[in-house]
Image (cartoon, rainbow, N blue to C red):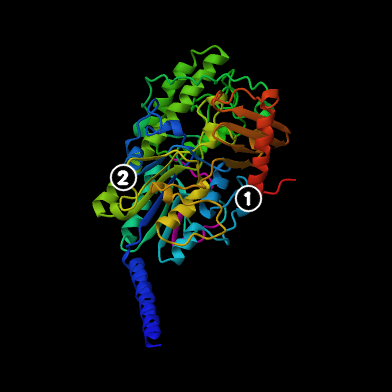
Amino acid sequence: MKVRTSMLGAAMLFIHFAAIAQQKNVVTGKRPNVIFILADDHAVKAISAYHSKFIQTPNIDRIAREGALMQDAYVTNSVCSPSRAVILTGKYSHMNGLKDNGTYFNGAQQTLPKIFKQNGYQTAIVGKWHLFSQPTGFDYWNILPDQGNYYSPHFFKMGKDTVYKGYVTDIITDMAINWIGKNKDAPFFLMLHHKAPHRNAMPPLKYLDKFNNIKFPIPGNFNDDYAGRRALQRQSITMKNDLDIRYDSKIPCDTCPVTKINAWAPGEYQKELSGLTPEQRAIWDKAYQKKYDVFKTLRTKDEIAHFQYQRFLEDYLRCIMSLDDNIGRVLKYLDKTGLAKNTIVVYMSDQGFYLGEHGLYDKRFMYEESFRTPMMIRYPQGIKPGIKLNQFILNLDVAPTLLDLANIKVPADMQGQSIKPLLNKQVVKNWRNEIYYHYYEKSFNLTAHYGIRTRDFKLMHFYDPVDAWELYDLKKDPSEMVNVYNKPEYQATIANLKLRLTALQKKYKDKMK
């Protein structure tokens, strides 16, 4: 009896001191800090860690080089607000309630920042929120209204409308560094959400001349005729027909022939320009007058389409140069303050982006360029450098992964999986070998659709307003140009994929009519 009592007492003492040690870790900041950096519409091919032909991004690449690069990361619903809600909750859109842009996010539900806060972390978000409801779970928030502006942007600082002078990517980084400086003695969780390089990609003045002498290669499927793909035939996100000469190409012409001029575009562009000072506006106008001089020499629709493609990439990549500069500022600050070793840094985009593939810009479709997203993570105390993961990883996995790395219990109702075992090079027998996707929005003449991607195939069902199926043999047709759904030799594959698709819908509780 004495031995049993003694053992019980020892066990109780162990539990008591373990609890004290755990609490001490929270108080002293021994748990890792977390900085989650989210860009908006950053295509995989516009990061040199993945693809070096367009641009060099040394600071973003540093995160991958000193940590892990996810080579096959995807999103569950490729559009801004829904992707952000998935990241916050670790749940698919139909489970967290936010299926499309413009829907209010229900902040009363369980979210990643709330869980960190409950576990002793200081929490903050700065930059683009785009969930329309007031942020919850954050000790501090300073967010752009809706999309925000590139120059002299308005922010809602803890609910108060505040205007900041300067360029938005610099301003958001200033906010982040200032907040870290005030909270570096406690474990912190910071969501650093950039606006760039979202349309209409207004670059900082210092980079207005970058890429002027570079001719970007036009994608091989830029002139895709959309044969056999009804949903693509009706969309209105093409570079040829739907980019606005004023708003997107910044050409000072409101009556130019053979181009699209949206009724809303001149006024919206003027709003964007109103954030520039007179001195800045003079520099801006001079730079884009040179583009207008080139534009005036063009005669055919193809010439104009190729011109607008070049213009789009120039400004898009200029914004990314500034983004990369500012990622570098954050990393240098962590080095300088001694925080780098114990701080998890994640960089990713809310989704991928078309840069002329299939003749498109924007995102939304389940085709690879939109569906796939860049993702990388660095944590010197917990992740060895130079790791490259080729497993299917989702934005759904962000919340469980960050909690797991911080030794916080992952809620059972989160639908994602922690990638911590993969980062530790453990063999995970039941890791996913297929991905479920569901997109709902119908703006820009898009069609709601869901689908399954395996290593070899992608099956999509477009259901509203178009009802059509598409199948791609990804080994033979990685550019997804030939819909083989109706070919006899693929019918057994289709039957198998439909069974697996139904199983995924059941697993993730996505009830289809």
Callout 1 secondary element: helix
Q: Main secondary structure of the magenta part?
A: loop
In x, y percent, where is residue 456? 56, 31
Q: Which residue is mark 1?
A: 507
Q: Who's the residue at 45% across and 27% down the image?
A: 313
Specify the segment rendered in magenta: 134-150
Q: Who's the residue at 69% across and 34% down the image?
A: 495
Depicted 117 relative to depicted 273: above or below: below
Front in this rendered view, residue 133 or 188: 188
In x, y percent, where is residue 115? 48, 62
Specify few, some or many for label 1: CA neighbours under 10 Å numbering under 14, 14-19, or 20 or more: few
In x, y percent, where is residue 266? 56, 32
Badge 1 vs badge 2, beta-carbon distance below 8 Å: no
Mark nearest the camera among 1 and 2 is: 1
Q: How many marks?
A: 2
Q: Residue lying furthest right in this view? A: 513
Callout 2 secondary element: helix
The quarter of the displayed image where residue 25 is located: bottom left
Specify few, some or many for label 2: CA neighbours under 10 Å numbering under 14, 14-19, or 20 or more: some
Magenta highlight on residue 135: yes
Looking at the rendered image, the quarter that the C terminus falls into is top right
Amino acid type of the residue tagged 2 in the rendering: Arg
Residue 329, numbered circle: 2
Residue 466, numbered circle: none
Amino acid type of the residue tagged 1 in the rendering: Lys
